[in-house]
Amino acid sequence: QVQVVESGGGLVQPGGSLRLSCAASGRTFGSYAMGWYRQNPGKQRELVATITSGNSTSYADSVKGRFTISRDNAKSTVYLQMNSLKPEDTAVYYCKFSKWYYDYWGQGTQVTVSP
């Protein structure tokens, strides 16, 4: 049984920072690609950042330079460090672990950026 649990979301003022964590259990995830997505009601789910098993990273243009994705294979955990947060970053954030046709998703965590 694979379980994926997210944490770290919350309310923050513009310009502030948050660090999201996503921990998976049930198998070894060192060979999996990991990523973060976000979605607001009525909008399409957006790919925010990805990190491969070889630690190669990729970011959406909207977050480039502000967000950093990282992973700890020993803990089967992917992180998203979010700095200089803007109201436009407000969304439910989802993590994903992927390998070939296998996709495991977190439950989502709310990030709200507001004065």
Image: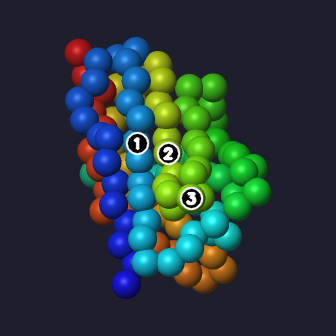
Q: Which mark is residue 20?
A: 1
Decide if residue 83 is on the left or right side of residue 106.
right
Q: Sequence order check: which comes first, mark 2 or mark 3? A: 3
| Residue contact between numbered discs 2 and 3, judged by CB atoms under 8 Å | no
Q: Nearer the viewer, mark 1 or mark 3?
A: 3
Image quarter (top left, top right, bottom left or bottom right) of the C terminus: top left
Mark 2, residue position: 79
For the residue pair 9 and 112, the one nearer the viewer reads as: 9
The answer to which quarter of the image holds residue 16 is: top left
Q: Position of residue 27 (x, y in %)?
A: 50, 78
Q: Residue at x 63, y 31 (%)?
A: 64
Q: Residue at x 35, y 26 (%)?
A: 87
Q: Sequence order check: which comes first, mark 1 or mark 3? A: 1
Q: Nearer the viewer, mark 2 or mark 3?
A: 3
Q: CA distance from mark 1 to mark 3?
A: 17 Å
| Residue contact between numbered discs 2 and 1, judged by CB atoms under 8 Å | yes
* 53 up-or-down from 18: above or below: below
Decide if residue 39 is on the left or right side of residue 115.
right
Amino acid type, label 2: Tyr
| Residue contact between numbered discs 1 and 3, judged by CB atoms under 8 Å | no
* Dot 2 alpha-carbon crowd within 10 angstroms: few under 14, some 14 to 19, many 20 or more: many
Secondary structure found at label 2: strand
* Dot 1 alpha-carbon crowd within 10 angstroms: few under 14, some 14 to 19, many 20 or more: many
Amino acid type, label 1: Leu
State the count of labels: 3
Mark 3, residue position: 74
* Dot 3 alpha-carbon crowd within 10 angstroms: few under 14, some 14 to 19, many 20 or more: few
Q: Is residue 100 visible?
A: yes
Q: CA distance from mark 2 to mark 1?
A: 6 Å
Amino acid type, label 3: Ala
